[in-house]
Amino acid sequence: MAEDLKKETAKGVIWSGVDRFVSGGIVFLANIVLARLLTPKDFGLLAIIAIFVQISQTFIDSGFGNALIQKKDRSQTDYSTVFFFNLALSIGFYIVLYFCAPFIAEFFENEKLTVLTRVVGLNLIIGALVSVHKTRLTIQLKFKIQAVISLISSFASATAAIWMAYHGYGVWSLVALTIINIALQVTLIYIMIRWRPSMIFSKTAFKSLFSYSSKLLGASLIHLLYRNIYPIIIGKKFSAIDLGYFNRADTFAMYVPYTIGSVISRVAFPIFSRIQDDNTRLRKAYSQYIVFTSLFIFPLLVGIIVLARPLTLVILKEQWLPMVPLLQILCIDWMSDHLCSINLNVLYVKGRSDLALRLEIVKKVLAIIIFFVSLYWGIIGVCWGRVVYGAIAVYLNSYYTKRLINIGIDQQLKDILIPLGQSLLMGVVVFIFSNMIHCSIVLNLIFSILIGALSYLGIIALTGKKYYCEILPLLKTIMRRG
């Protein structure tokens, strides 16, 4: 990457990291505390509601956020058109959710879901008030403002939710965590950001953006419907408790790859969009992107797999132990996720959302077949089915990346081979050490984590110096700016 792009990337990664790791970490820790105070059933109820809220949210955004980022000559008319479209759609979907709430409660055989759905659904309207504001901040690479806003809202909402849980509010403390968070974000954004939409809705601007975003909407919707098959079927076929175990395991497994991936992709997408016509620079940048994310994601996921049981006992207590095998398997699944995302990002940067839609259709047909076959072996089988699908998805996603910028599956596997091998070697060291020492489970966990970190750094120093030479300048730039 050119020097100016390196500097912008470094600055963006720092503040995007503060946003995702610090703010997201606060919410993550709050969920850990809440998991110790509440029951798996409470989390299962929220997971059911999240199905319908997430699907509605996907329709509301309709891919317009990415369309605005990818477009080079965006205007006030474009921003205003998207703002009013999102707001109108959010109101419409909330009305639908409001009247469908009793049917949702009846289907899942829990009357609490009626009022819970109606309250949580308010997030749709509240969030629509700032979706364009956030997109503008991302385009301008103003991640510092977003980080400050997220930090304040996350801390306040987490504090309120934990207080409510301690005082016996049960599942409503989880509701408060989401409602207070988004409401505070809206308040702070309107205080700190001067931009306001004009009273304009342009059909021309809408059609121009929708030609790109419609394919994103289709791809996102197909992916989201597939992801939500899991809570729907598990919640109906098994129980809300089983769904709670699966939901927490998936949430814990995805935290590392999702957080690291989103930190970098939030910065990378607007920057890579600027060099979308220079395949040489884009190819080199994406290769570094793969190495950079793998360097952090793989060792953390391997560490969770090895230490899943003590982590669960120390953090969540014994009532959550049934989720341990689910967590270990889903960590394997999430190892492939950042490669899938990187490949799709290439299509979005290149403006080929039509290819992304085509891929999602093919992949999700295969995924649904794998899912229903895996149900035969229960929830464990479902998790292994996810692993199989993840491997297939990486291969399929790389097809168009090869065509567009000449980075195929062979090159991507070369990029991840060394960090994956180093992470597995670290995992062996941690496994042996954790089984050799005999002390309290808390001390065992602490020592194992320290040994894991030190051994991974040592392994890199011995085997990967030359391999990481190309990304070291970016790391140094980030550290200097930190």
Image (cartoon, rainbow, N blue to C red):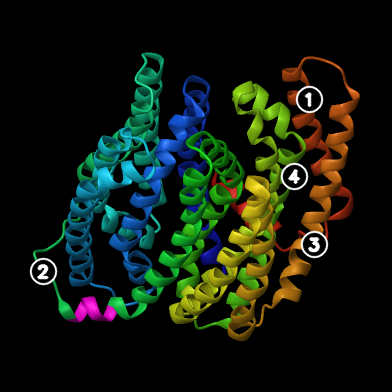
Residues marked 1 and 3 touching at CB (< 8 Å): no
- Residue behind mark 4: 302
Magenta residue span: 204-208
Real-space Cα separation, disc 1 to disc 2, in angstroms: 60 Å
Q: Which residue is depicted at the point 32% across and 42% down?
A: 106
Above or below, comparing residue 200 to residue 296 in the picture = below
Disc 1 packing (10 Å; few <14; some 14–19; many ≥20): some
Q: Position of residue 165 (x, y in %)?
A: 40, 20
Three-letter amino acid code at the position of disc 3: Leu
Which amino acid type is shown beneath numbered disc 1? Phe
- What is the spatial separation of the Cα atoms under label 2 and label 4, in whole angstroms? 51 Å
Q: CA distance from mark 2 to mark 3?
A: 51 Å
Residue 349 is situated, as x and y percent measured from the top left of the image, at 48, 74
Considering the numbered disc 4 on the image, is that residue within a helix, a strand or a loop? helix
Horizontal relation, residue 455 to residue 50: left or right: right
What x and y, as percent, mark residue 227?
50, 56
The residue pinned by badge 2 equals: 200
**Label 4 environment density (alpha carbons within 10 Å; few <14, some 14–19, many ≥20):** many
Residue corresponding to mark 1: 447
Is 228 or 335 nearer to us in this picture? 228
Mark 4 or mark 3: which is in front?
A: 4
Give amino acid for label 4: Val
